[in-house]
Image (cartoon, grey):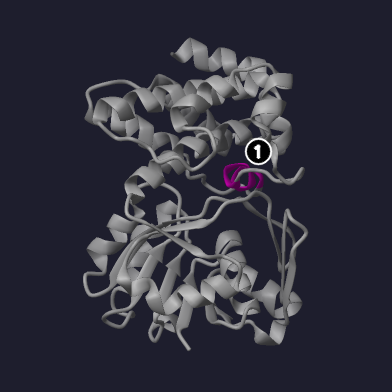
């Protein structure tokens, strides 16, 4: 049986690893002591927006804080926040066996490259988790939105495909991962808006003013991608270039035409919103900041996404959590543009 190790087992890592473990896979978790203590007490309870439910007893969960636990792993799934990628890569370099497979299931565009540079003896692949995971209680992890796991196509995945299939999380192999990552990033531009709104995703996306904020951020990114010759993949029923126009429609029209975008658990929030609530640094520099860096490489500007970065950073250091209304946030972004 293949040995799988989740490195950076927070919400995403515990959910993915927990689903694999519940389906009979051999899984070890590496992460923070706080979460390890929770799992040793409560085990794992995994649920999703379709009313699925899986449980793993505390005695069956192997959760440690030492990355040396990955030494004999056949597959390592890296799920740390982007800011920690380099340090995790440095920790794994002397630990992993040659030939091990590593998948970066992280936000942003460059994490697999960082891992690949540090781990030349391993097969490092870019992956993408399209859905939101929240933690409603100790040892409990809930998938609030839909989508399939995407990963760069490679023969090294073959030994692990059955494990993911049995877990109900099939790996969708892609030959166009850069296009897939940009498409996911376009959708993730909403994370900053959701964090600043301090509302559940479904409530936020049901309001036209917030959707117009997202449309501004996406339109700016799409203009830059076109200039760079990058065509984002189609991950939703609507092509990426059409989404800003759909977002800007009145609420009643959006509810009818964009209903699938609202197929979200009513309590789900973005991971960036969760980070602000917990007082953690966000990944805004690896999401909206990617658009800003693309603009710089092209000799262009990305004022809307730069403003979102600035507002989120201000929220990170604020003594009180901001609650931007849709109208006020839209005005701030239009002023910046």
Q: Does residue 66 show up magenta in the picture? A: no
Q: Does residue 276 show up magenta in the picture? A: yes
Which residue shows up at 61% across the image and 36% down it?
195
Q: Position of residue 246 (x, y in %)?
A: 57, 23
Which residue shows up at 48% across the image and 45% down it?
283
Q: What stretch is highlighted in magenta?
A: 271-277
Q: Position of residue 240 (x, y in %)?
A: 46, 32
Which residue shows up at 49% across the image and 28% down it?
308
Q: Which of 313 and 134 is in front in this view?
A: 134
In the rendered image, the quadrant that contains the C terminus is top left
On screen, residue 42 versus residue 125, left or right, reads right
Prevailing SS of the magenta stretch: helix
- Mark 1: give few (<14), some (14-19) or many (20+) Cα within 10 Å: few
Q: Name the residue under label 1.
A: 260
The correct choice, above or below, for 258 with respect to 110 in the image is above
Which residue shows up at 52% across the image and 65% down it?
170
- Judge whether residue 327 can be spotted in this image: yes
On screen, residue 250 versus residue 73, left or right, reads right
- Judge whether residue 307 can be spotted in this image: no
The correct choice, above or below, for 134 with respect to 63 in the image is above
Q: Nearer the viewer, residue 165 or 126?
A: 165
Q: Position of residue 325 (x, y in %)?
A: 69, 21
Q: Position of residue 306 (x, y in %)?
A: 42, 26
The correct choice, above or below, for 323 with respect to 208 in the image is below
Number of marks drawn: 1
Q: What element carries label 1?
A: helix
Which image quarter: residue 53? bottom right
Q: Which of 19 and 137 is in front in this view?
A: 19
């Amino acid at each position: 049986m293949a040995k799988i190790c989740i490195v950076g087992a927070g919400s995403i890592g515990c959910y993915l690893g927990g689903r694999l473990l519940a389906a009979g896979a051999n899984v070890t978790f590496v992460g923070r002591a706080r979460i390890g203590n929770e799992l040793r007490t409560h085990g794992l309870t995994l649920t999703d927006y379709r009313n699925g439910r899986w449980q793993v007893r505390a005695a069956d969960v192997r959760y440690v804080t030492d990355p040396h636990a990955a030494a004999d792993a056949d597959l390592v799934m890296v799920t740390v926040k982007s800011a920690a990628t380099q340090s995790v890569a440095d920790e794994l370099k002397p630990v992993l066996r040659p030939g091990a497979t590593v998948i970066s299931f992280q936000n942003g565009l460059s994490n697999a490259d960082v891992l690949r540079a540090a781990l030349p003896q391993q097969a490092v692949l870019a992956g993408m988790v399209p859905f939101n995971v929240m933690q409603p209680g100790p040892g409990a992890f809930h998938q609030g939105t839909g989508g399939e796991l995407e990963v760069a196509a490679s023969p090294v995945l073959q030994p692990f495909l059955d494990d993911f299939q049995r877990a109900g999380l099939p790996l969708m192999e892609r030959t166009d991962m850069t296009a897939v990552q940009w498409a996911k990033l376009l959708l993730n531009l909403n994370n900053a808006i959701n964090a600043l709104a301090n509302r559940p995703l479904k409530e936020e996306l049901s309001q036209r003013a917030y959707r117009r904020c997202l449309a501004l951020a996406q339109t700016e990114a799409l203009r830059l991608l076109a200039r760079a010759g990058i065509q984002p993949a189609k991950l939703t029923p609507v092509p990426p270039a059409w989404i800003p126009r759909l977002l800007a429609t009145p609420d009643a029209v959006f509810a009818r035409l964009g209903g699938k975008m609202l197929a979200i658990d009513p309590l789900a929030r973005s991971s960036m919103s969760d980070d602000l609530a917990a007082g953690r640094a966000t990944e805004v520099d690896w999401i909206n900041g990617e658009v800003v860096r693309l603009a710089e490489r092209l000799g262009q500007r990305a004022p809307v996404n730069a403003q979102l970065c600035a507002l989120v950073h201000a929220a990170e250091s604020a003594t009180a959590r901001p609650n931007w209304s849709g109208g006020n946030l839209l005005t701030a972004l239009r002023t910046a543009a």
